[in-house]
């Protein structure tokens, strides 16, 4: 009997802040404190139709996790991600049939990186934005029907020199340079960016670092001086799975 009472008491403690509020034409359901602070999984229903309009994960009153929006028919319209109230990661948008129509990346409320439009489940347009909202790369997949990606005359390297830094390589300490790079990666392709040492004929002497990240940009450092007869460069290897099924190799010198 004592165990049953403990279990029942624990259940009601867990459910203590589960309540319903009516705010701005919505019925809000979830863990809501006495001063209306959301925590955990919160659902928003249209107060007139009782159709679920939105749900999301909250922590201390701010979005922290996935947020799902629904249309007037209760179908998923968009899926977004948040961290401490800031939109971060890929936002995905869907039509009434559940097909993905658009996908765009946000970094703490700033639109940056890939923005992709889909048609019948296939990528139609791939755009890539810099932090200043400048469109720095655009690929219309219709243009590839009679061409290959490297023949479109696009700039695949978007590198900015950030300034001087102290560079440490093992026990070697020297003045260096820091760069930032936007890493393109259109659907149906695989873009691999590497920091390398090359000779005058673009033969790779050494791969210094693979430039990869979960976010569509990153920074890296190199020594300020040339390494003997070799130059620091960015190597881009493009794997084409759409047309020619071939690999392409490109370089961008940093010195």
Image: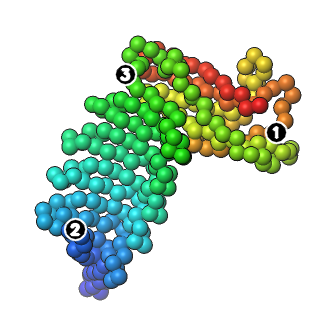
Q: Position of residue 210 (x, y in %)?
A: 64, 36
- Residue at 78% in and 19% down: 200
Image quadrant in which you'd find residue 147: top left
- Residue at 39% in and 48% down: 91
Q: Position of residue 111 (x, y in %)?
A: 47, 48
Q: Position of residue 28 (x, y in %)?
A: 25, 70
Q: Estimate the spatial distance between the alpha carbons at disc 2 and disc 3, rounded to whole Å.
A: 43 Å
Q: Is residue 14 visible?
A: no
Q: Is residue 47 visible?
A: yes
Image quadrant in which you'd find residue 174: top right
Question: Considering depth in this image, is 17 or 137 the residue closer to the camera?
Answer: 137
Q: Which residue is mark 2?
A: 26
Q: Are marks 2 and 3 in contact (CB under 8 Å)?
A: no
Question: Considering depth in this image, is 190 or 156 the residue closer to the camera?
Answer: 156
**Residue count near mark 3 (Cα–Cα under 10 Å), binned few <14, some 14–19, many ≥20:** few
69, above or below 167, in the image: below
Question: Considering depth in this image, is 36 or 134 the residue closer to the camera?
Answer: 134
**Residue count near mark 2 (Cα–Cα under 10 Å), binned few <14, some 14–19, many ≥20:** many
Badge 2 element: strand
Q: Position of residue 21 (x, y in %)?
A: 24, 75
Residue 18 numbered tag: none
Which quarter shows the N terminus? bottom left
Q: Which residue is mark 1?
A: 224
Badge 3 element: helix
Badge 1 element: loop
Residue found at the far left of this picture = 49
Mark found first going from the N terminus, 2 or 3 = 2
172 lies left or right of 38 = right
**Residue count near mark 1 (Cα–Cα under 10 Å), binned few <14, some 14–19, many ≥20:** some
Which quarter shows the C terminus? top right
Mark found first going from the N terminus, 2 or 1 = 2
Q: Which residue is mark 3?
A: 142
């Amino acid at each position: 009997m004592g165990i049953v009472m403990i279990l029942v008491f624990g259940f009601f403690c867990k459910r203590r802040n589960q309540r319903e509020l009516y705010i701005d034409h919505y019925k809000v359901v979830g863990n809501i404190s006495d001063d209306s602070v959301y925590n955990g999984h919160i659902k928003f229903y249209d107060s007139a139709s009782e159709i679920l309009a939105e749900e999301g994960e909250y922590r201390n009153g701010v979005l922290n996790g996935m947020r799902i929006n629904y249309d007037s028919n209760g179908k998923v319209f968009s899926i977004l991600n948040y961290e401490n109230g800031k939109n971060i990661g890929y936002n995905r948008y869907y039509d009434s049939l559940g097909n993905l129509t658009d996908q765009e990346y946000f970094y703490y409320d700033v639109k940056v990186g890939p923005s992709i439009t889909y048609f019948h489940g296939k990528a139609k347009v791939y755009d890539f934005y810099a932090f200043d909202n400048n469109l720095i790369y655009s690929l219309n997949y219709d243009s590839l029907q009679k061409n290959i990606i490297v023949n479109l005359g696009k700039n695949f390297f978007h590198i900015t020199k950030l300034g001087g830094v102290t560079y440490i390589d093992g026990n070697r300490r020297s003045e260096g340079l820091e760069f930032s790079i936007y890493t393109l990666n259109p659907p149906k392709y695989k873009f691999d960016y590497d920091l390398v040492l090359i000779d005058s004929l673009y033969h790779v002497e050494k791969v210094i670092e693979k430039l990869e990240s979960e976010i569509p940009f990153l920074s890296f450092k190199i020594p300020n001086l040339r390494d003997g007869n070799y130059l620091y460069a960015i190597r881009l290897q493009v794997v084409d799975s759409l047309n020619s099924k071939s690999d392409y190799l490109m370089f961008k010198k940093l010195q």
